[in-house]
Image (cartoon, rainbow, N blue to C red):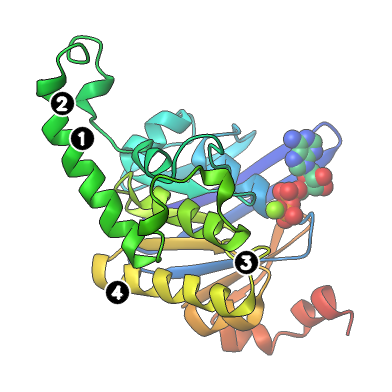
């Protein structure tokens, strides 16, 4: 579903992503781990089209997206969430949910003046948003400002919002950062459920290896912009080079 071949991204002197290749198969749950500053967020930005790759090729779902814009890549079915939840704090929870919905008639200048043309569709999207919010116990907060949510609730809203764009592949940047352990576990349960029941594919950057390794099929380890190891969670746990980078053993 996603293939990177020899992808590089440089910030002046610093090579943040260095000749990197990886693959994510459809329906897989893949982890991307590595110390702070190893280039994980930069890599997600390059895949999602927020940053242009300097070298290499990126393919997603049959499209060469190496030179595609972030908007085009999103239309192809790739959605991402951010390390900080990046919600619109002064918009309601429901309005945040409705932002990424594709094909909204009310957004078209030729349709917008006629409420009756788009209202049924908007009700339908609102019902869909409500069903997603119910999954993460946020439905009673639908009319609250997003900035009034707790940190954990914001992470849940960010994940739920990503789903409203009907993606096939989700890139999640630290979906449990700053969240209490029990809720972090619940977030991964939700991700596993989405993979199982909706066939969604995930590439997840995560620092909590003990939780991540319980859920993912495959792990890539990044260090100084490169993949230094890859394998199943059991293989990664047993890898001496990974232990050295992570724990200084
Ligand atoms: P990670 O997500 O693994 O912690 P990042 O991708 O955020 O790592 O950062 C990788 C390296 O690139 C770091 O040294 C960081 O300081 C640098 N970096 C990230 N974004 C930029 C930028 N926009 N301009 C310059 N340097 C950047
Ligand atoms: Mg990061």
Disc 1 and disc 2: Cα gap in Å?
A: 6 Å
Q: Quadrant of the N terminus?
A: bottom left
| Residue position for label 4 | 196
Q: Which residue is mark 3?
A: 206
Label 4 crowd bin: few (<14), some (14–19), many (20+), radius 10 Å:
few
Of labels 1 and 4, earlier in sequence is 1
Label 1 with label 3: CB-CB less than 8 Å: no
User: Residue beneath label 1, please?
Assistant: 122
Residue 212 horizontal/vertical position (percent): 57, 76
* Pick the front one: 75 or 99: 99
Left or right: 129 in relation to 71: left
Comparing 168 with 62, the one in front is: 168
Quadrant of residue 73 in the image?
top left
Q: Are marks 4 and 2 in contact (CB under 8 Å)?
A: no
- The local crowd at label 3, few if under 14, some if 14 to 19, many if 20 or more residues have their Cα within 10 Å, is many
Distance CA(mark 4)–CA(mark 3):
20 Å
Q: In percent of the image, x 80 and y 75: which residue is there?
A: 246
Locate the C terminus and report the quarter of the image it occupies: bottom right
As drawn, is 8 to the left or to the right of 14? left
Find out whether the residues at labels 3 and 2 contact each other: C-beta distance under 8 Å: no
Measuring 33% from the left and 35% from the top, which residue is drawn there?
75
Callout 2 secondary element:
helix
Q: Residue at x 49, y 61 (%)?
A: 203
Q: Quadrant of ligand 1?
A: top right
Using the rendered image of the protein, determine whether residue 133 is visible from the camera's viewpoint: yes
Q: Nearer the viewer, mark 4 or mark 2?
A: 2
Disc 2: which residue: 118
Q: Residue furthest right?
A: 248
């Amino acid at each position: 579903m996603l293939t990177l071949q020899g992808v590089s991204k440089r910030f002046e002197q610093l090579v943040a992503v260095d000749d990197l290749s990886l693959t994510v198969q459809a329906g897989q749950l893949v982890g991307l781990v590595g110390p702070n500053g190893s280039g994980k967020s930069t890599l997600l930005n390059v895949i999602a089209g927020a940053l242009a790759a300097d070298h290499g090729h990126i393919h997603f779902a049959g499209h060469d997206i190496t030179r595609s814009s972030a908007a085009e890549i999103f239309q192809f079915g790739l959605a991402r969430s951010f390390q900080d939840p990046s919600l619109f704090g002064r918009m309601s929870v429901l309005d945040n949910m409705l932002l990424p919905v594709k094909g909204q008639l009310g957004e078209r200048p030729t349709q917008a003046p006629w409420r009756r043309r788009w209202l049924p569709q908007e009700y339908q999207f609102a019902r869909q948003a409500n069903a997603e919010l119910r999954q993460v116990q946020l439905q009673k907060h639908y009319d609250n400002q997003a900035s009034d949510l707790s940190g954990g609730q914001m992470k849940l809203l960010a994940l739920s919002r990503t789903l409203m764009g009907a993606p096939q592949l989700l890139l999640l940047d630290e979906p449990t950062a700053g969240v209490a352990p029990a809720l972090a576990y619940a977030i991964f349960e939700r991700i596993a459920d989405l993979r199982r029941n909706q066939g969604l594919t995930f590439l997840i950057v995560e620092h909590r290896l003990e939780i991540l390794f319980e859920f993912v099929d495959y792990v890539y380890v990044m260090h100084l912009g490169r993949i230094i190891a890859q394998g199943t969670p059991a293989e990664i746990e047993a890898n001496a080079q990974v232990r050295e980078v992570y724990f200084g053993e």
